[in-house]
Amino acid sequence: MEKFAVKIAGEISLSDTPGKTMKKWREIFEITQAELGKHLEISPSTISDYEADRRESPGIKVVKRFVDALIEIDSTRGGQIGQRFREDTEGGVFYETHEFATSITGDSFTKIIEGKVVVNDDIMPEKKLYGFTLLDSIKVIVEMPYSEFPKLFGASPERAFIFTKVSTGRSPMVVVRVSQMKPSVVVLHRIDTVDKIAVKIAQKERIPIVTTKLSINDLLEKLKKL
């Protein structure tokens, strides 16, 4: 198995709720239960049972078949999601990515990080987050090649970007504005007032901005438990 496939399989095997973790990865790969069932030659209801943890925890062989199926189906579509994993340099100089065991709503995420929604609060309940990326805003903006930007999205663009070392929030939002891929939520770390231009960009892009005063260590401790 490829390195990223081993990572997925390991996460499922070690999860307290392997079915929910399997569902998360199926959704990240944008594959329906019917498509997966057809590929594995099992009924969609069987997959539903696994995802609802109504069956025994899947063994190594089942997990391997599941992960292989995700990658094979993705390959028939051009392999874009798999390619994202291959290019991912998790723990890099500029940023750190983390995928949650199961998806969480924007509201739940905000509570966990003890955050305050600055703009677009109305769409937070419908936001579904699969992970987060912690970014050193200065290094990302000044030093990171634009071609590397897609790597910030890890397994899924449905994630929160947490920008550290921000002063007004304008520069991070400009970066988000010019990018083809967009995060679901932007978090500005330890900022008192968000720049008006940043707010306008967020409104135009319909991306919530959240601020938090938690320390980086506390943020990571809370979020890496998910």
Image (cartoon, rainbow, N blue to C red):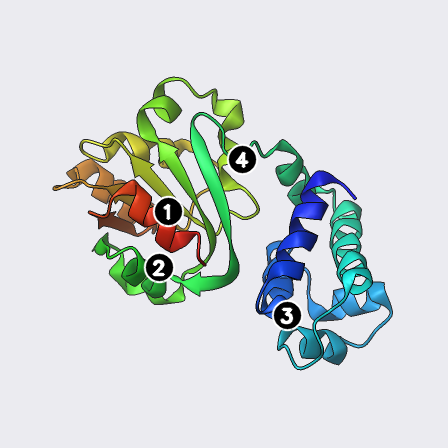
Task: Measure the alpha-carbon separation of dots 1 and 3.
Answer: 25 Å
Image marks 3 and 4: residues in contact by CB distance under 8 Å: no
User: Is there any visible trace of residue 204 in the rendered image?
Assistant: no
Question: Is 87 located above or below residue 209 in the figure?
Answer: above
Residue indicated by mark 3: 19
The disc at residue 109 is 2
Q: Secondary structure at mark 3?
A: helix
- Where residue 42 appears, as percent x and y from the top left, is 83, 73
**Which of the two discs, 2 and 1, labels the residue nearer the N terminus?**
2
Question: Looking at the image, do the residues carrying marks 1 and 3 touch, with CB atoms under 8 Å apart?
Answer: no
**C-alpha span from label 3 to label 2:** 21 Å
**At numbered mark 2, what does the secondary structure look like: helix, strand or loop?**
helix
Q: Position of residue 64 (x, y in %)?
A: 79, 56
* CA–CA distance in space, label 4 to label 2: 21 Å
Amino acid type indicated by mark 2 = Phe
Which residue is the site of mark 1?
220
In the rendering, at what x and y percent does residue 122 appear?
28, 64
- The answer to which of marks 3 and 4 sits earlier in the sequence is 3
Residue 158 visible (yes or no): yes
Q: Give the labeled residue for mark 4.
A: 90
Sequence order check, earlier mark of 3 and 2: 3
Crowding at dot 4, Cα within 10 Å, few <14 / some 14-19 / many 20+, comes out as some
Spatial CA distance of label 2 from label 1 is 13 Å
Question: How many angstroms separate mark 1 from mark 4 (CA)?
Answer: 15 Å
Q: Nearer the viewer, mark 3 or mark 2?
A: 3
| Mark 1 residue element | helix
Q: Which is in the foreground here, disc 4 or disc 2?
A: 4
Task: Residue at 37%, 47% (x, y): give it.
Answer: 220
